[in-house]
Image (cartoon, rainbow, N blue to C red):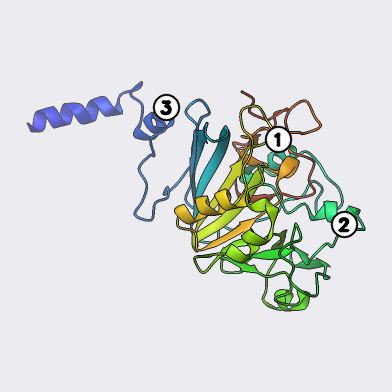
């Protein structure tokens, strides 16, 4: 018996016998992870658009994206991303031009590639509200700098966007707030570096925001959508549904909020949708931006994106949009 075990070990060491990590890379199965669910060293990247599955692991980040669909009552395609972090891995908001939040814009996949981003979704498109002087902008906080401090004096769930806020807290957790819950300076005093301003917030303390959903026609209005949430600190969820295309008609906020709840989110927030909406993996956009005014199906130009993780394996490629 010992002799057979010796031969097996020798065969595994011979050239041409793939290591377990290489086998995992070929099949998409997770490689050996430590007790906390991460790699001890190196990176694991696996993509299979035909199966609708994308995976990534490193010593500080693990994520899985699953593409889902249904045909009734309307055709719909959406992507659900589960993201786990460890240690000091934090969400950040890379810009098209260094330090130029809400001014200079570029195609999102180019921003992701430039910063070698592992995973990204779209922002709150605050730049569009700033450009339109008829719109309320809301409180805008980027990289610890207060770029806009005015919001509505009273909460208005009927307005869209209602200018609710989601903060990336210093400890890595998410927190959501009504549009007028705190002053801009109070958020700065909390030590918050980045906030998203759009809304409505969908879930807080595990409870659905029924009042906001029922106040607005966006509850059932079909559109491309992007939502983000947190199950617990270190475990996050992002969901994007495609819309305005033949293969996918989009969905309402109620559907998206329920997806977050079904995944166990205790915090949930709605971001800008429409042509802004996207999900990116390793510099490649997974959804087609329906109604986009470009032949590639890229989401509209953005000044910054919402991202986590970086990797030298992200390469420049154009156009980097999956089309089926």
For the point 51% across and 50% down, the residue is 259
Number of numbered labels in the structure image: 3
Residue named by callout 1:
289
Residue at position x 55%, y 40% in the image: 79
Residue found at the very far right of the displayed protein: 133
Mark 2–mark 1 Cα distance, whole angstroms, equals: 23 Å
Q: Is residue 100 visible?
A: no
The mark that comes first in sequence, 1 or 3, is 3
Q: Earlier in the sequence, mark 2 or mark 3?
A: 3
| Number of the front mark, 2 or 3 | 2
Q: Secondary structure at mark 2?
A: helix
Q: Quadrant of residue 295?
A: top right
Relative image position of residue 68 (x, y in whole percent): 50, 36
**Residue 78 in the image: above or below residue 232:** above
Give whichever of discs 2 and 1 has the lower sequence position: 2
Residue position marked by numbered label 3 in the rendering? 26
Q: Which residue is mark 2?
A: 130
């Amino acid at each position: 018996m010992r002799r057979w075990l010796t031969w097996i070990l020798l065969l595994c060491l011979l050239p041409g016998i793939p290591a377990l990590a290489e086998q995992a890379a070929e099949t998409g199965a997770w490689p050996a992870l430590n007790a906390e669910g991460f790699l001890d060293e190196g990176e694991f990247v696996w993509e299979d658009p035909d199966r609708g599955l994308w995976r990534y692991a490193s010593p500080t980040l693990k994520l899985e994206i699953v593409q889902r669909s249904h045909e009734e009552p309307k055709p719909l395609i959406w992507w659900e991303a589960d993201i786990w972090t460890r240690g000091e891995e934090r969400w950040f908001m890379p810009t098209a031009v260094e330090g130029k939040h809400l001014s200079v814009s570029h195609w999102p996949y180019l921003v992701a590639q430039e910063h070698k981003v592992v995973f990204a979704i779209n922002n709150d498109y605050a730049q569009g509200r700033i450009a339109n002087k008829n719109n309320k902008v809301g409180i805008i906080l980027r990289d610890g700098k207060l770029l806009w401090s005015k919001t509505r004096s009273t909460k208005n769930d009927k307005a869209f966007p209602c200018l609710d806020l989601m903060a990336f807290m210093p400890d890595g957790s998410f927190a959501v707030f009504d549009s007028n819950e705190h002053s801009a300076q109070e958020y700065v005093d909390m030590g918050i570096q980045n906030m998203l301003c759009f809304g409505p917030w969908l879930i807080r303390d595990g409870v659905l925001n029924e009042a906001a959903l029922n106040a607005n026609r966006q509850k059932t209005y079909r559109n491309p959508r992007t939502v983000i949430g947190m199950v617990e600190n270190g475990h996050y969820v992002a969901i994007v549904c495609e819309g305005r295309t033949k293969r996918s008609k989009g969905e309402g906020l109620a559907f998206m909020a329920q997806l977050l709840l079904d995944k166990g989110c205790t915090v949930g927030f709605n971001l800008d949708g429409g042509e802004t909406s996207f999900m990116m993996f390793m510099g490649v956009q997974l959804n087609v931006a329906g109604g986009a005014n470009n032949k590639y199906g890229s989401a509209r130009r953005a000044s910054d994106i919402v991202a986590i993780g970086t990797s030298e394996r992200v390469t420049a490629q154009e156009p980097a949009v999956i089309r089926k």
